[in-house]
Amino acid sequence: MKFLDRPFIPKEKVSHIIIDRRIPKNIEYESKNRNIEIIKTCECKELYEAVKYHADMQMCYLGKGDLVVAPNLYEKYKNIMNKYRFNIIKGTNYIKNKYPYNISYNVALFGEYAIHNFKYTDKNIVKYINDNNIKKINVKQGYCKCCICIVDQNSIITSDVGIYKEVLKYNEIDCLLIQTGSIDLFNMNYGFIGGVSGILSCDELAFLGDIKKHPDYNKIKEFVNKRGKKIISLGTNKLIDLGSIIPVMTRKE
């Protein structure tokens, strides 16, 4: 087993993911059936009920075992992650209940790009971005990882029009705009495409639930297939937003 070198885009088959501990049993079964170990999140009491276990709200994986965690949860995750030998970096921004003080770690990192509202990004994440010459794409939307399904280092899917319009300025980025909704998020009206997805290998993009139930399934399938990936549905129920599938370790087979 080894840590992913860069965030969200594994080169080999994923062996470990971080995900909301409320993961439905059928999705957990499908994940374990793929020999994926699930690292379950702990509760962040400062966040509202629907997202209080969402990994993409609590932390940001930077690659090579470096995991920036909100200071509210630093001691908890030091204990949880100790056996995996992560380097847990204490964030500078405490998570608070209301926007924009709950978005500091919700950064979409893919390839040479980072998308966020950088007015509120945690300083440790900004340092990583600057040190690695990653291009900042600044948007008004703060819940960027929630809203962005990362397909590969140059391709994303989103239902957020503001993000879509901003990335259109970058010729090297392909972005598919889909309709909002058709995703469950506990007691909220709907969830988001980034929160239901994650890459499980160099050629597999997984969704939490049955992606065929999404009204834009055919568009999504065509977009993903053109980029050399196949779609994996982890479960047969409606898609559920669990704060992203965060791949952190891989295996060589």
Image (spheres, rainbow, N blue to C red):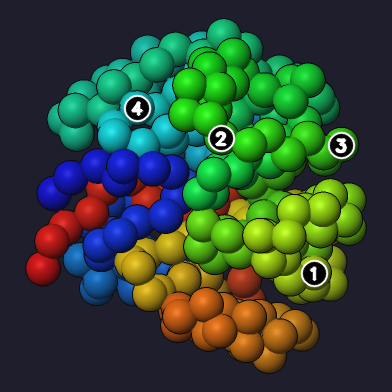
Give the amino acid type for the residue marked by disc 4 in the picture.
Asp
Of 192 and 68, the residue lying toward us: 68
Disc 1 from disc 3: Cα separation? 17 Å
Numbered label attached to residue 177: 1
Few, some or many residues within 10 Å of mark 2 (<14, 14–19, 20+):
some
Determine whether 95 is above or below 189 in the image.
above
Give the amino acid at mark 3: Lys
Q: Residue at x 79, y 72 (%)?
A: 178
Q: Which numbered disc covers residue 71?
A: none
1 or 2: mark nearer the eye: 2
At label 1, the amino acid type is Leu
Q: CA distance from mark 1 to mark 4?
A: 31 Å
Query: Where does label 4 land, which residue?
Result: 66
- Determine which of the numbered discs, if any, sits on residue 134 in the image: 2
Residue 231 picture location, percent across and down: 48, 81
Disc 3/disc 4 C-alpha distance (Å): 27 Å
> Which element is circle 1 on?
strand
Name the residue beneath numbered marker 3: 140
